[in-house]
Amino acid sequence: MDLKSELLKSIWYAFTSLDVEKCGKVSKSQLKVLSHNLYTVLNIPHNPVALEEHFQDDDDGPVSNHGYMPYLNKYILDKVKEGMFDKEKFDDLCWMMTMKKNFKGLPKGALLSQRDCFKLFCLFNLLSEDRYPLVMIPEEVEYLLKKISTAMSQEWDGKPLEDFMSQDAAVWEGDMSVWTFLEHMGAGRLLRVTSAEAFSLALDEVFLEMYHNVLKRGYMWKKGHVRRNWTERWFVLKPSSMAYYVSENLRDKKGEIQLDKSCVVEPIADREGKRCMFCVKTHNRTFEMSASDQRQKVEWTQAIQTALRVQSEGKSSLHHELKLKRRAQREHSQRERSRSDRGSCSSRSSQSDDSNVHDAEKDRKDTEIESIIQHAREVETRRREAEEKERRKQREVQLELERQLKEAETLRDSMQAEMQEKEKEAEQQKKRIQELELTQRKLEAALNVEIHARLEEERARQELERLLQAEEAKKQQFQLLQEQQRALQCLSPIPEASDSSPEDPTPSALSSASQELQDLQASRQRSHQHLEELQEKLRYASQHVRHWNVQLNRLMKPIGPGERLEHRLLSKNMCPKKEGALASNEFISKFKKTSDQSSGTPEDIEAPEDIEALEEQMEAADLSDGSDELQRKSNGQM
């Protein structure tokens, strides 16, 4: 059945709905309105001139169906092409026109809704015979009811249909019209239905399959061509194309695979974490897809192969071909029955034998039908058991994944807590190291101050020793002069002239020596006082060094074995003495030797280069032992 024949069925309903008097004729004004609506819904450019010329008011009376057909064929149906209009909207227009007149409506609490009635109207037109008025034979009614029952996942029960046939045999003699079909379906006389919602969902699935030629639909994973990532899409397979959307509401269409004779569907190996994979190869691209399980993979590949077969045979609808095959089978069966009837009439003598053979044949057919039904029941039972097993397996896998997810979350929380603890410890260590470095710098500064104070004390002590030696020499000289003077006084009176001799000691020499001795004693007193001040300064510096040494030891105790290996090696390389740290006096003597060798004078230790060398050596020294020994020696010297 071509597109023109399909459209004529719906237009026939619209035309008969305008025939108020049921005489087969419609007024021209109504036909103008109908033609205008058909132009609009079929997306055909309007031709008002041809419309007025064909329906001009130069004759009286309405136009019959045969009078309207030439205009309909020439200006409307001949211009219609597949894909240029929405067939569901077209049928909806004809349904709305004919429903108001012929459909009595649904009683309260009916099984069907208005939308369900429209879908059954479209399916009725699809399966009806190609003669007017349109009717559907019992075999096609049973076929449609079986499809709906299978979509509801319930076993086919033909008892309601058989009971209805036995009670109202007059209906089946003249076949069934669409209005009778909708009336009995709404009353539940043809199919036993427990849930109106389940029936509506099943009818929607059958409507998509038979009316819209949807061979299969569902979610699958598709690999992109640009970003090469996997995305879940909703696929809708038809004989000519395979479209994919973001979700099942079909609002956001992402692409379409055009199917033709060159297309090939092939299974591919699992990879990239995906399983149950296959691909559809076209003349310029390859589409990789992943089904949810092996069963869905087989169903999708078989459905695509069916679509490719229908496309290669040049057919547009799979169910139209199935309808023609069923019709051919019925015609063949009728010819066989008529042939057998003619044979029975020609040989009356063998009528009883033929009846027995016919009964045997009928019994054999009944047995075959029963075996087929039983086999179908067994297959359905095995399918349900397999589905239940697959659901249990998926549930177990889901529970296992949930358990692993909980374990992973617990492990992640524990690792995060451990990392936070490690970060806190690292922050504390970093803070302690900073305090240690600051304390070390302060200790180095204090030790430098102590070293300089001790060197100044040493110079002051040497100066005091020099003054003591000079004072001692001056005392001896003064005593020698006093003895000489006493010796001269004891010998004889000294003459007047001798007193003026420059060789004899005079009171002026004694007074001069006495004055020098007093000056030396005053210098010694000042030097001694300066030495005490330097010793006091050294004492304060030693206390300062001991304080920062205690702070340094306190900070060094918490530093455990968590130090880096490079830091330990660097510390070992910096230390000049392996058997122990240098004390303060040892460091001073060593520094003196180094400075004496470089400059020869103790005053050169004030140079910046020596101070920098002093700081570098102090960084490698153990300060605690040196400061204690330095304090003991300074106390002894004082």
Image (cartoon, rainbow, N blue to C red):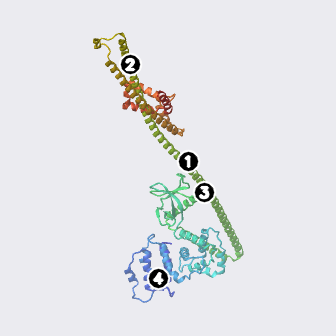
Q: Quadrant of residue 372?
A: bottom right
Mark 1 residue element = helix
Q: Distance between the residues labelled 4 and 3?
A: 66 Å
Q: Which of marks 2 and 3 is in front?
A: 2
Q: Which of marks 2 and 4 is nearer the N terminus?
A: 4
Mark 2 residue element = helix
Which residue carries the number 2 mark? 473
Q: In this view, does 432 lie to the left or right of 58?
A: right
Residue at x 44% of width, y 35% of height? 446
Q: Earlier in the sequence, mark 4 or mark 1?
A: 4
Q: Earlier in the sequence, mark 1 or mark 2?
A: 1
Query: Residue 547's x, y, as percent?
Result: 49, 37
Q: How crowded is mark 1: few (under 14 residues within 10 Å), some or many (20 or more)?
A: few
Q: What residue type is labelled 2?
A: Ala
**Location of residue 474 with respect to 260 vertically, above or below:** above
Q: What residue type is labelled 3?
A: Gln
Q: In which quarter of the image is residue 501?
A: top left
User: Residue 418, which numbered label?
Assistant: 1
**Location of residue 421 with respect to 367 vertically, above or below:** above
Q: Distance between the residues labelled 1 and 2?
A: 80 Å
Which residue carries the number 3 mark? 398
- In-front residue for pair 221/571: 571
Q: How far apart are marks 3 and 1 (CA)?
A: 30 Å
Q: Which of marks 4 and 3 is nearer the N terminus?
A: 4
Q: Which of marks 4 and 3 is in front?
A: 3
Q: In this view, does 572 lie to the left or right of 377?
A: left
Q: Earlier in the sequence, mark 3 or mark 1?
A: 3
Query: Residue 41's x, y, as percent?
Result: 44, 75
Which residue carries the number 4 mark? 66
